[in-house]
Image (tube, grey):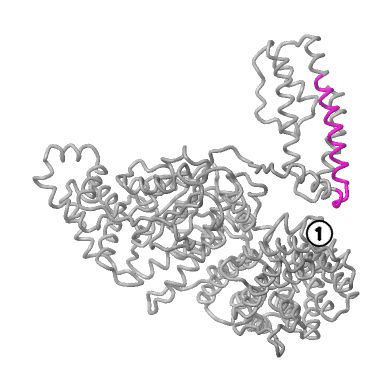
Amino acid sequence: MSSWVKKARGPIELFRRCMKNNEEDMNEAENALVDVLGTYLSDQISQVLANDGPRIAFADLRRVRKISSTKFFRSVLGSGSEVTKKTWKSLENRIDDYLSDMDATVKHLVDLVNYPKTTIAAHAGSLSLRNAPVVLSREFCAFPVDTLVRSRNIEFFGRVGELERINAYLDPRNNTKLRTYTLFGRRGVGKTDIALEFAHTNTSKFDAIFWVNCETSGALRTSFAAIATALRLPNADRAGCHEENQLAVQHWLNKTSQQWLLIFDNAESSEILKGYWPTGAKGAILITSRKYYNFANDAQRHGDTIKPFNERQSWELFMKLLGPNWQQKNNDSQIKEKEEKPAKALLQNFGGLAIAIQQAAQLVNNVSIGGPTIASTLEAFKVHQKSLPPRHIHPRSVMELALDSLWDMSFNGVTLDLFLPTNQKSLEGKLQFCRQHLSLSASDTGAALSSVISEPPLLRDAILELKRLKLIKYDKRTLGVHRVVQEAMNYHSSQEMQMYFDSAAAVVYEAFPKQLNSDILSKHWLTYENYIAHGVSLSLQFEEYHQLGDNRALKGSLQLVRLFINCAWYLCEICDYNTCLRVITSGRLACESTETLEYGKLCSIAGCAFYELNDLENCRRNFETFLLIQEKVLNDNELEKSSSLHHMGVLECASENLDLAFGYLARAIAIRISAGDEATNLLANTYLRLSRVFFNKMDYYSALESISKSEVLYLKITDGGAAPFLAHIYYAYGNIYAASGDMERARRSYIKSLGISNARTSVHPIAAAGYYSLGAVEFELKHHEKSIEYLRKALSIARLRSPVYDDGTVARILWKTAVVLKEATDSARSGEIDLLLESAERALEDPRNSGGCGHVLPRDDNGQVDETGLQEMYDSLVPEFFR
């Protein structure tokens, strides 16, 4: 056994080094090697031991890594009876042969990896010519697969005709093109349940069924991440990679030969779906929406208006939900005597809505709420209609009054005090029943710890109580509350509403990692992903209820403002600028004063978002406010003060006020140096920005000196890790080398930047900028085909980030691609070049890309574009760092 270990150690170590030196993420390859070795040894040893005892189960041979090989084999062989020498010799010979083959294969792999890339490309091109007709798409999971968020509804009723029409159009056996079917109708009519029923009853027809929650952009991202994970697409479970998953899933939908069904639930906005719609794919799409909107401008789309149940259907559903005792009474005509009239009067209030009929049946069956009869339930219902407190936002319609009364009766029937959220140390007073393991609570800078094994007993009781009363759906460890039920929550006073809102905000705040001194949050992205939807939801609700005026308006708190600050900073880092600015708006409304440090931090984040959006006017307004507040409140040498100085330096550099920029950044550097190790990360960022000032002055020596300091500082705190910030450092190196005329070194720097960004944030703006700049360098080197290839990669990322319209980044890439094609090709592609230039010009003149005014291309007397200065004009459309 020891000889095998020695023989295997060499090729395995060689393979490990080979994978480590490769640019790609090869963790999966290393794991695959262990799996292959484990499977082989399992088969061989099991054959030897087959006649000597039960077959050995090798459920997880990854544990080989954790124990010595000798101990492992001893444990395996010791589990059976003694193996004959002859059989053992046969096993030994087979494994020796296997290790020899593995050694030769790994050495060949090392030779391949060490080939120059041009040689590999030539070999690949030759192979593709010889085998061009064969195109195999790789799948990473076993089918069928689904991401359905709920189990089949055992109480589903009716809708036979609707399901038949959906099936007739979406059945993959009838058609292979992209097919879209929309279910639309009012809220609560049962659209989602119909879609869910269709999915669960047609699993044999589709290889993959994916459920996409479209209520918010965050829900969309989460759904596509779940799809990528279910398909086991490479790196699907990495933190902060929503757009990468979005791109990977889109690619899979377009390339796979599997039959798939995509269900977009609660799709109410065409803009929010852009970038997620699988244009050009072949598959089936089912949409639920409150309106019959043509999301993809598809002339062949089909759909169905989901109408409420009629009187007969409502009665049949009501009887089914009431259960066998009431059904027997109905069959025996006992209901007609006393209960039929009040039952129909009760149902008439709900307009045939399935969700309301279900809740009405629940009330009738709960004698503690409605009494022993349908008539008594109707009388209790009428009393609630009269005593219901008013809605805080707007007066109720007749239907809203009926629905709110229905659920108010249900909530009043809850026996537990369970209207408060779960948390740890921040739970006081009425929230204490949710506490568990308080001693394990995390510090103020992290999330509170909670059990992932089981719910605390009182919380479990609360969940079961709500589920029993049909107020929530609890399936697959997911709690769901229908929008109709959410709207029916009635607060008897503004003070009560404020108390519940503050409790929810406290819980979410406790879960969020805290941002300090404008430092980068990338190491906490995974935690933020889990909670950001709650923070955004609170911000939207606060904005809505704060604007009520008088004594009904929600009031902000310091904790709520700090929650919004953390949310907004994370959203800015992952480049979700629109949502970031919405959260900032809510944060400003929640601030007690416009002169507090918290208000200044909100201005700081807004300024960063506007800088990335290339809106320097709004960037300046926010950064100057931030500086003014910090100058009033903080001492000159406080570390926090360096943030406003740093931001002003970035702004003045982008505004070409280079001396002012240098002064601000120099002051920030002095403060951050004096702060010591605590500010290492911040100092690295400021040196990076200082290098840009020298770059704009064309002092490339000083620029390189400054950026090398940034690199050393950042490598010091990351142990050489491929953190996202390093991608910006190597991108800046590339810009300096390119401006100096050293195209080869520029090329290597851009490739290094892309290696990091592709590993962590492959569709971040830095990735699009990296591919664009690499394309520009290849163009200067006269490598036109490579240049076009890189520019097209940049364009795919840029359009994914701006699906609604062509932004400045898209415009610059389109123009540059046309320039390269014009020089590289003959007149045969002139039509393509003209289309690219027309698209680029439209985007250039779009006011959204130029601070609301738009650029106009300079033309000569003949109407031809004057190409002098075009590069600078298109560069001005992108944030200054990426020029």
Let me know if residue 96 is in the magenta part. Answer: yes
Q: Is residue 868 left or right of residue 361?
A: right
The residue lying toward the viewer, choosing from 699 and 748, is: 748
Q: Is residue 465 left or right of residue 387?
A: right
Return the residue found at the far left: 337
Let me know if residue 710 is in the magenta part. Answer: no
**Would you call the spot at circle 1 few (<14 residues within 10 Å), some (14-19), or many (20 or more)?**
many
Residue 489's spot in the image, x, y percent? 35, 61
Circle 1 — which element? helix
Whether 587 is drawn above or below 416: the answer is below
Residues shaded magenta: 94-119
- Kindly indicate the quadrant of the structure image that contains residue 636: bottom right
The residue lying toward the viewer, choosing from 550 and 545, is: 545
Return the residue found at the far bottom: 861
Residue 833's spot in the image, x, y percent? 70, 70
Residue depicted at x 22% and y 59%: 349
Residue linked to disc 1 = 752
What amino acid does circle 1 point to?
Lys
Residue 462 seen from this side:
no
The residue lying toward the viewer, choosing from 385 and 137, is: 137
Q: Is residue 809 left or right of residue 182?
A: right
Whether 401 is drawn above or below 52: the answer is below
